[in-house]
Structures are given as C-alpha cells and as structure tokens.
Amino acid sequence: MSPTPSERASKERGRTSRGVFGSGLAKGLAVTLRTMTRRSVTEHYPDAQPDLPPRTRGVIGLFEENCTVCMLCARECPDWCIYIDSHKETVPPAAPGGRERSRNVLDRFAIDFALCMYCGICIEVCPFDALFWSPEFEYAETDIRELTHERDKLREWMWTVPEPPGLDERAEEAKELAAARKAADKAAQTAEAERLAAHREQPPQETAPAQETAPGGPAPGEPAPGGSAREGSASGAAPDEDRGDGGA
Ligand code: SF4
Ligand code: SF4
C-alpha cells in the first residue's frame, strides 16, 4: 500500500528536522551560551521585593461607605466569587410630613481570592466607586479558606490603594469637588450672615462717664498713675529702675 500524502509529508519533515548529527546539541549549547551572557530578569523574591508598577492588580479593596449594596459587582463577576448579604432598614422622613424610606444595610461583603481571576470587572461596573485595585500581593495562605477576605480585611486593603493620578491642569474640576466647594462657600456665607445679624442685634454697650482728670493727668488711654508694676510707676520709670540698685 502506497503512503498517503500526509504520511509522505511527515516522513519528509522528520528527515529534514533530523539534519546533521549533533546539530541539535550545538543549537542547544548556543542558546545556553547566549542566555548566559545576558542580564538575568528573574527576581529574587522573597529576598528582594519586586519593583511592580503602582497600578498592579494585587488585591481588591472595599470602600464600604460608598457601597449601596446594589449587587451589580456580584452579578457581573464571571467567577461568582463575591458574596454579599444585606438587610433593609426603614429610615425616618428627612422633613416632617415626609415619607419613610428604606435603605439597604450591608451585613457581609467577601471576595474569594482563590476563585478570583483578577479581571477587574467588579471594579469597572461598580457605579459608586466602592471597589479599588491595590498593588498588595502578599496574602498567600496555607489554608485555601483563608483566601476569602471578609469586609474588614477588604477595608484594610483600602489603605494600600495608591492615590489617583492628578487631573490635567486644564481638565474640568471633578463634580464631587465642585459640589464640595459650593457647599463650603454656602456654609461660609451663612456663617458670615449669622455673625453680622448677631452683631446688629447686640445692644449698644453702656459707656462709662468720662472721668475728670486733673490738669497734667494722663491722657485717655494712658495708664493711670499707680497702675500695676507692668504698666510702670507713677514717675514713669521702668520697673527695673524702681528697684534702686539696678536690681543687681
Ligand atoms: S476581579 Fe473579576 S473575578 Fe475577581 S471578583 Fe472582580 S469580577 Fe470577580
Ligand atoms: S457594585 Fe459597588 S455599590 Fe454595588 S454592591 Fe458592588 S461594591 Fe457595592
């Protein structure tokens, strides 16, 4: 039976790849020599810390105050490794006659980093900026269950999140900053208005009747004769001079 075209081709390939005897060894040695002369790129971790970029995806931090328990991150996570528990609470109306409102209160927020594939989808989809990447990566555990980080631990990671890069100098001010500035200006104006109103309502202070002073007496505002030692003596001498011998 004659060989099929594919068999013929594979036979041909084998013949050419075998080549000259010992050529493979020579090629291997050449690769070894080439890499021996190059600078090593391996890091001696944990003896030396790797120099990682500041935005490395190390671990996820949770800024709990921003989380509204909307569950978007848990729903979008492709690994289903975000666990959220919450309950509803009724909030009294803000103004008399208003309606009561209900809000979600977070009971549990955990991420299982044994399952997480560091895709960052949860961080991207969070509409309230409650999740952030931290470059910390040293949280290996000997027990896989310890890789489920609960909300306290996720909160701790927040302290390691680097500051966001500064805005371009011609960029528009962030709307959060603009709102905060507006609120601060308004508060300052209200405080100033209250201060002026209080000043206006204050009754005029009774002024003491002008004292008759003897001719040659002190002018108004000048210390009276016989005042305290700090104000000087009646003769106008400095306190040290009063002590006679120069106070020596
Ligand atoms: S990074 Fe990806 S896999 Fe990990 S928790 Fe977020 S969405 Fe899930
Ligand atoms: S998407 Fe953001 S706000 Fe919504 S539950 Fe997740 S962390 Fe909280």
Image: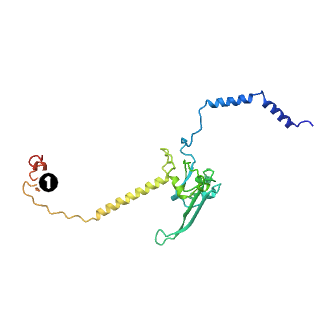
What residue is drawn where x is 81% and y is 33%?
14
Q: Vertically, is 47 above or below 31?
A: below
Give the tally of numbered discs. Answer: 1
**Furthest residue in direction left, as rendered:** 215
Residue on which the image places disc 1:
229
Q: Is residue 23 left or right of residue 70?
A: right
Q: Is residue 13 above or below residue 145?
A: above
Q: Work out which quarter of the rendered image holds the N terminus and state it.
A: top right
In the picture shown, does residue 244 fall above or below 95? above
Residue type for callout 1: Ala
Label 1 SS: helix
Which of the two residues, 234 or 23, is positioned nearer the viewer here? 23
Q: Position of residue 160 (x, y in %)?
A: 51, 50
Q: Residue drawn 46% across and 53% down?
A: 178
Q: Residues within 10 Å of mark 1 (few under 14, many from 20)?
A: few
At 71% across and 29% down in the image, what residue appears?
Answer: 27
Q: Can residue 196 be seen in this snapshot?
A: yes
Q: Name the spot of residue 86 as percent of width and height, x first.
A: 57, 64
